[in-house]
Image (cartoon, rainbow, N blue to C red):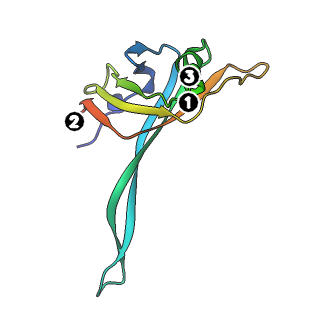
Amino acid sequence: MAISAEQIMSGTFGEVWLESEYVGEAKGLQAKLNIEKEDVPVAGKYATDSKFMGYKGTGSMRLYKTNSRMISKISDMVKQGKNPRFQILSSLNDPAAKGAERVLIKDASFDDLTLIDWELRRNGEVECPFTFTDWEVKDKVEPQ
């Protein structure tokens, strides 16, 4: 069955919570799994198959620079030699679509902390890359 353009979910309706705190300056969010496989040659075949060996969760939260949220959350802990872990909740709920999708990243560890990044005549943005090992799909949009 063909889809309608109205069913395509727009990022305009995406929202982010970091440790249950709404992140109103969010510009974008991505989290994905990199599937780790090992090549396996199979007798009697020219093709090389692969065996699942694990995964690595990576992502990035993109923010408009409106405050010092990330510096406040991470800076002191890093100075103390700690690797802070965070929960990130994503919600994508386009009213024209066929439902909402919510995914919780349970143990995000940010890879860097931007202390300064600005340029004349340019809107401020901060890129916050992270890794994770656990997630939970809270709500999903089923195919119609």
Which residue occupies the foreground of this view, 28 or 9?
Answer: 28
Which of the two discs, 1 and 3, labels the residue nearer the N terminus? Answer: 3
- Frontmost of labels 2 and 1 is 1
Helix, strand or loop for disc 1: loop
Quarter occupied by residue 10: top left
Q: CA distance from mark 2 to mark 3?
A: 29 Å
Q: Which of the marked residues, 2 or 3, is nearer the chain's N terminus?
A: 3
Classify residue 70 as left or right of residue 57: right
Q: At 60% across and 12% down in the image, what residue appears?
A: 67
Residue at left 29%, top 85%? 43
Disc 2 and disc 3 in contact, CB within 8 angstroms: no
Up the image or down, 64 lies above or below 58; here it is above
Looking at the rendered structure, which numbered label has been put on residue 142? 2
Foreground label between 1 and 3: 1
Q: Quadrant of residue 103?
A: top left
Q: Which residue is mark 1?
A: 81
Task: Choose top left, top right, bottom left or bottom right for residue 53.
Answer: bottom left
Three-letter code, disc 3? Leu
Left or right, 58 with reference to 92: right
